Image (cartoon, helix red, strand yellow):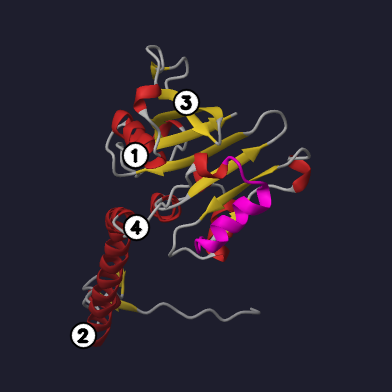
Amino acid sequence: MLFNPQRNDYVDAGGPVRYLDDSGLKRPLTAPRQQMAAMAAFVLAAAVIGGILLHSVLDAVNGGAARAQASMEENLARDVSYDLPALAALASLDDASIRQTFADAGYSTVDLSTEEEFPSGGFELAKLPSDVSTVDAGLMYAQGIAQLSAADAARLLKGSWTLTVDRSEALSMNVRYADFSSGDVNAAVQAAVAAEGFDPATVPEDGQGVDEVGNTFMTGTVDVDGSTYTWRVSAIALSEVYDISGLPDSAVYVGIRLTA
């Protein structure tokens, strides 16, 4: 034969019947002590690693949300001033003089428009919170306010405002900002009227209420160098303007407009 397979060993069992040798099957099934110890160590290590991973996942879900909320509240608690522009005092100035007024006051501003957007004169700029750099603000504006986290939105919006000056027809000046302290739209309107120095006595009988798009408003007139200008203050829930989860429900978006 070409192959010589190993011959099975048989043992006699007291008769003509022969049985296979089952001594190999009678060996103990337990692993050696050294291997058992290694397996136990492996299982323990796997359990520890699994526990760490589970803790990390739970912390990312629960702890991360808590940290984000704390960061947002910390940003809202910052002691930064809005320094709202007095529109009536700016109405008689040209664009360059308005910008210079802000520079003299030490405001940090960023341009949000180009000359092509206002061919007849005018501009749009944002005054930044005193503790936010122009670089950081530029990155956040480029991302889009509505796309920011609640913490970043609070950092940018608290203490900032946007001013638009349009001279395409009659002069129109409009400043917009987020109010986190008034608590509701009515209080925010009253606070804005007081900040601008507008006289509520000039408000006509139908000069306040809620308009067709849901803004709570108040409107009146103010004299600027012998000319009568119309002012209008309006407010709406900030959530109606920016869908940013996590910001306070009491936050208000305020607009102040002065037109010739």
Q: Is residue 197 above or below residue 80?
A: above
Relative to 121, 127 lies left or right: left
Nearest the viewer among 198 and 15 is 198
Disc 2 or 3, which lies upstream in sequence?
2
Nearer the observer: mark 4 or 3; the answer is 3
Nearest the viewer among 27 and 154 is 154
Residue 139 in view (yes/no): no
CA gap between label 4 and label 1 equals 14 Å
Which residue position holds label 2? Answer: 33
Magenta-span inclusion, residue 106: yes
Secondary structure category for the residue under label 4 = helix
Nearer the observer: mark 1 or 3; the answer is 3
Disc 4 or 2, which lies upstream in sequence?
2
Which residue position holds label 1? Answer: 251
Q: Residue at x 32, y 65 (%)?
A: 53
Disc 1 or 3, which lies upstream in sequence?
3
Under mark 4, the amino acid is: Asn
